[in-house]
Image (cartoon, rainbow, N blue to C red):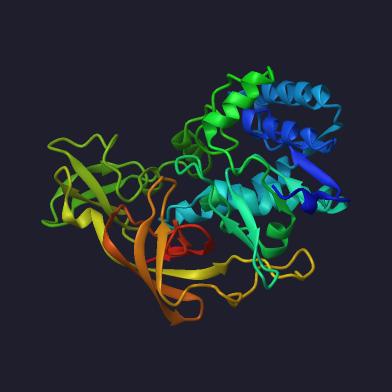
Amino acid sequence: MNTKELEGKRIAVLLSGGVDSSVVVYELAQLGLHPDCFYIKIGPEEAEEWDCSSEEDLEMATAVAARYGCHLEVVDCHREYWDEVTRYTMNKVRAGLTPNPDVMCNRLIKFGAFDAKRGHDYDLIATGHYAQTETDEAGYKWLTTSPDPVKDQTDFLAQIYDWQLRKALFPIGHYVKDEVRQIAEREHLVNAHRRDSQGICFLGKINYNDYLRRYLGEQPGDVVELETGRRIGQHRGLWFHTIGQRHGLGFGGGPWFVVKKDVHLNILYVSHGYDPQTAYSSEFRIHDWHPMGAPPQSPPRGGGGRTVLPPSGGMGGAITFKIRHTPEYHPARLQSVGDGCYVVHSAHPIHGVAPGQFCVVYDEHHHRCLGSGEITV
């Protein structure tokens, strides 16, 4: 964190109640700063029907803000979340795709709806993401990876707009998780031993399939072996299954891998075996390319990202990529086919490539995040 970057800046901290964002407040306090803290409320639609830890989260956030003499305000983005992120999720799964709600939550809520409601009064928005930024000689601000390959969250930030990236501040991005825990323990923070949240940011302990069933119901259809055309069972809805899934299918004679969906005919195709070749892809297309690298002067808020790559994009040669939140970066070549579409030529077969997932692209050394696109059929 460059202290010169903070001189004279108004800073808002998104304080969730977890240990990561709490250490963000500590880090800023060590610099003599008392940022305003904000707890974003995006809880379930009907609290009495869902098991949610938001009350405990707010208690933790309140205690941490008070510890460092910071003002805490609750910002209700509940409606925006359900109108935008839930609609995105349901539209994608209904179309047979594999969405990532957490990616959209960062763009539309944490750096979007919050900015529209309160963040526009601040120069920087600090979060507890494991990510970093750097500015090149031309003045472009880049999203760069954390030294912790397991916790790195640049893949979740790869769809934010350039103006959002210019306002983003990641004070713990240079740490690994163990270091953050050690700081919290040393400072006796109230949530030092609190477990990390798992799954989609707003669901808490809610089962994802129950969430889908609530909004989409069930739509039974045939399960067919891809190689033989043999019907082996029935599914309850294509949206309950993801490409590459092996566990929890419940079909006899397994193991089975989900390898394809036919939305029009409502057929789920599977392949037999522990590691069938049909579960892998060495080449796939992405569309709606979203470049990273915020320019020195960003366009006004409310618009989308740029449609061209910034200087030194590094897209002409070798790249690395991710298609899901894992520590591994896969080497590949990226071939432009026009209109914001690319073909990813992976150096080795990748398991579970699913339309709707985001392919996040990095430079050859997986340092700078160059952008992301949605995997298409």
At horizontal 64% and vertical 58% (from top left) the residue drawn is: 134
- Name the quadrant containing residue 136: bottom right
Q: Is residue 136 left or right of residue 209?
A: right
Residue 197 appears anywhere in the view: no
Pick the residue in front: 82 or 337: 337
- Name the quadrant containing residue 56: top right
Q: Position of residue 240 (x, y in %)?
A: 39, 43
At horizontal 54% and vertical 73% (from top left) the residue drawn is: 313
Q: Is residue 178 left or right of residue 53?
A: left
Q: Position of residue 115 (x, y in %)?
A: 78, 51
Depicted 203 relative to depicted 170: above or below: above
Q: Position of residue 29 (x, y in %)?
A: 79, 33
Depicted 329 relative to depicted 315: above or below: above
Q: Is residue 232 left or right of residue 288?
A: left
Q: Is residue 258 left or right of residue 34?
A: left
Residue 166 appears anywhere in the view: yes
Q: Position of residue 54 (x, y in %)?
A: 67, 26
Q: Which quadrant of the rendered structure holds the C terminus?
A: bottom left
At horizontal 65% and vertical 54% (from top left) the residue drawn is: 107
At horizontal 14% and vertical 56% (from top left) the residue drawn is: 229
Pick the residue in front: 356 or 328: 328
How many numbered circles are shown?
0
